[in-house]
Image (cartoon, rainbow, N blue to C red):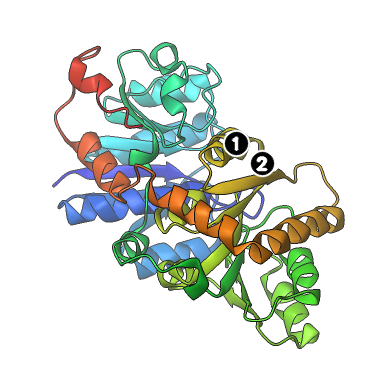
Amino acid sequence: MAVILIRADASPTIGTGHVMRCLAVAEALRDQGHEALFAAVESTPAIDRRLSADGFRHVSIAGPVGQAADLAATRSLLRREHGMAVMLDGYRFGEAYRVGLQAAGARVLAWDDLGDGTPLHADLVVNAAPQAAALPYDAMAPGAVLLLGPGYAPLRREVRLAAQEPRRAIADRPVLLVTFGGSDPLGLTGPVLQALAKERPDGCRIVAVVGGSNPRAKEVAAEVAALAADGVSVEIDCPRMGALMADCGLAVSAGGGTMGELAALAVPTLLVVTADNQAMASGDAAELGWCTAVDARGCDPAKAAAVIAGRALALWADAGQRQRMQDAATALPLDGDGAVRIASALTGPALKPGSAARRRTALA
């Protein structure tokens, strides 16, 4: 059994996506007989509860994030736990931190969504975006094993299991899902729900999933209760996301980690770009035809909500278009085993830099 350290943070400001996609790989690691240990400078009570409920150890370490105390604490934890590898997920780890972490001797896996040329100092790199193989990772992480493309989308077990069920036609998927991740930093859930509720189509059930790390969670639930609108509901920290997504004939979702889950379940989706790191992958995904995208960065929440709701209602009214989007998603090279592949690469024998085997890790 190997011990894998997962260094990722969560907060209402940065969201919970870093931890959640690592959680998918942690499940796969455990299935393969290894132990995953989460370490965070910043976390939320909801994330801590989720990790505990799933049976994963998690510890708080010294900060600030990405600074010397963080690096020292992470290296100390690696030594104490005899960790053979560390997964690093976040945008606040500078080059000095990355150099120091790799010098600790454990295998380093770096998650990346940007491909902006920043040196990663990693032994493995994961980017599940459709066009990730075109990014300059040979320069960013020379000699690293590259785990690129939708074949490496990390899906949690409940989503993988739901994705194995037969697809239902659009006419048999009556739910319009609204979800802006674990914390919804732009505060879009409430305004979008109110705009949709005013013109909810017949036969459409609108469900908003709000993460427990969202500081407005209770406020959103109260707003929906005040609407007293039939067919509109809110779930906080939904424990059955896979089954819920399988019921969805359309999703309105932030363009983060949920994107891969929606694609795997062939859910036609309106992606909302809420952060810079979501823009490239959302644009690439929209070109594949299973989703469309709208950019909400820098917009007033009320105005953004009106645009988002208008786009969503137009898509809901066009069942033929949504069926074509579902068909496009079904054709994607996304079999749900991305987390398993990542776990196997992280703990398996190292590949020689530049080898043919290394290049084949880039799945389109």
Above/below status of 3 relative to 67: below
> Observer-nearest residue: 49 or 332?
332
Q: Quadrant of residue 198?
A: bottom right
Residue at the disc numbered 1: 283
Q: Is residue 187 visible?
A: no
Tag 2: amino acid: Ala
Residue 253 image offset from top left, x and y in percent: 60, 56
Residue at 64% x, 55% y: name it. 12
> Observer-nearest residue: 339 or 124?
339
Taking the image as shown, residue 302 lies to the left or right of residue 270, namely right
Residue 170 image offset from top left, x and y in percent: 50, 67
Residue 37 image offset from top left, x and y in percent: 32, 50
Above/below status of 69 relative to 164: above
Residue at 54% x, 24% y: name it. 94
Tag 1: amino acid: Gly
Residue 161 image offset from top left, x and y in percent: 30, 64
Taking the image as shown, residue 162 lies to the left or right of residue 286, namely left
> Observer-nearest residue: 116 or 130?
130
Which numbered tag is attached to residue 275? 2
Q: Give the class, few, some or many, for how many residues have Cα within 10 Å of label 1's Cα (few <14, many ≥20).
A: many
Give the distance between the C-alpha atoms of the residues marked 1 and 2, in whole angstroms: 13 Å
Q: Quadrant of the C terminus?
A: top left
Q: Is residue 215 visible?
A: yes
Residue at 70% x, 87% y: name it. 230
Taking the image as shown, residue 193 lies to the left or right of residue 148, namely right
